[in-house]
Amino acid sequence: MSSKNLTPPIQLPRKELAAVLDLCRKLNAERNFPELLKVLSQEAAKILQAESTSILIYDREHCELVSFVTLDGVPIRLDARLGIAGAALMKGMPINVANAQEDSRFFAGIDKASKTRTRSLLAIPLKDSAGEYLGVFEAMNKKKGGAFSQADVDLAVYLVSNAAPAIETAQILHLVSQERDQLSQVNAQLWKEMEGRFATQNLIGTSPKVQNIIRLIDQVRDSSVDVLITGENGTGKELVAKAIHYNSLRAKFPLVALNCAALPENLLESELFGIEKGVATGVDARLGKFEQAHEGTLFLDEIGDLGKGAQAKILRVLQARVIERVGGRANIPIDVRIIAATNKNLEEAIEEGVFREDLYYRLKIIHIHTPALREIPDDIPMLANFFLNKYCQEMRADSKRFSPSAMKRMESYCWPGNVRHLENEIKRLVVTVRRPIITGDDLEESIRFGKVLRHSGTLTHGQSIHEAVEDLEKRMILEALQSCHYNQVQSAKLLGLSRQGLIKKVKRYGIKES
């Protein structure tokens, strides 16, 4: 019964053979899998003079036969080892039953599921082009009573053999379509998560400096102008770059990042512009970052570390918007938005002759400066609680909160590593502190006894310089004592005083432990 041997039996009438060939032409033109099965069921019933026919597709993974053509449109699933159809599939040969109700192999659940009563039944296994079983073709209840004849069996085998290639093709297309739809759903969900992850709402802070960054990102969302982000290490420059990209018109295209400081000068050109095959022995063609980011965004981190030669090449690309691969001669147009970031003072670098002034102004169409954490101390509590909740959830730890002393110590600390420093400290606290309340004593020693933020004194009306200095000194001593839990040795170390010097000042200002 191979689909490769389609020669009709000699005894079959010409009319039936013509009907089979006409049906196959219809099937070959139909690519919708459920519709193809419906057409096959309807036309095959006419050809075989049966009350109905059905095609049960073999689901090998679940060992089930599935009928896709049903009254309510909901597929019927049956154990592939049961019933006459299951027997035909397992034996790999046609089965013709004159009285199904008296046959021990008959599975009454089929009648119950299809809401019919089966009398006579003809089951023919279907094979694909590789000889694997696709399923089973069934014809139920020969019209005008009686059973299906041997001629009916021959005709059904011929019909099934001719129809199998069309069924196989439509099934493959159906599975591909299902996988594509599932992939689209997954992509849509991932995209939703990505948008949420890099939405401007996740730039934490209510200080004017942070709010200005958020407003600027929103203002440039409909444009593709290049952006320069400056700021110290750990201030969130990459997070800002991602927020710019994922809130822009280019959001559904690639965001490609390159750390300019991490690559030696001799590899940077091929990394940026790509390389042609055969430039050197064993070298294959490779796309550069510019081509990978086509229609999207290229994030050049630590651009201040680029050499003058690489700077000149990037400037040419920004002006001409074309690249040339290493070893190539053709100009390749590119449509890329550049977001550059650096922790260096590029204006000072220009004066020192190590950074090109024309590249600086070409990149600085929009300039965003990410503030150091010491510049936005009022945002520390919000950031600290955000990271605490985040890592308690991620690490499946019990909920925690900061004591007032711990929060005050964090607010007064200078945080030389900025937001990244704060985030890593809180991640450590979530791992190491088992109690529900994190106290000042749980903080890392460098934070408990390290450099505090210096608060500038305000000169009130009629106040002398001497009085202002004393007022500032008194506040600094009080803050140091409170942050060190009135430990005089640690407080003196924090203030850069001797213990005796601190004791004298405490007595002088009348500072008492509160």
Image: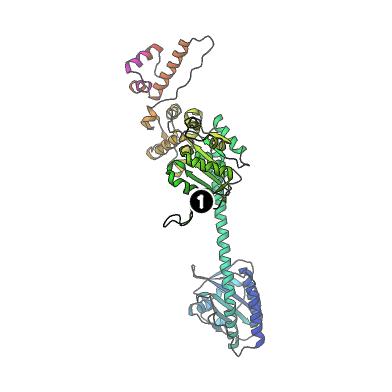
Q: Which residue is painted at 45% across and 22% down in the image?
A: 454
Q: Magenta span: helix, strand or loop, mainly?
A: helix
> Left or right: 101 with respect to 409?
right
* Numbered-mark total: 1
Q: Secondary structure at mark 1?
A: loop
Query: In the rendering, at what x and y percent does residue 263 appear?
Result: 43, 44
Is residue 41 placed above or below 11 in the rendered structure? Answer: above
Query: In the rendering, at what x and y percent does residue 301 appear?
Result: 48, 40
Is residue 482 placed above or below 420 in the rendered structure? Answer: above
Q: Quadrant of the C terminus?
A: top left
Q: Per the image, is 76 magenta?
A: no
Q: Residue beneath label 1, please? A: 325
Question: Dot 1: within a 10 Å radius of its alpha carbon, few (fewer than 14), some, or many (20 or more) residues?
Answer: many
Q: Is residue 236 visible?
A: no
Pick the residue in front: 111 or 378: 378
Q: Which residues are magenta?
A: 492-504
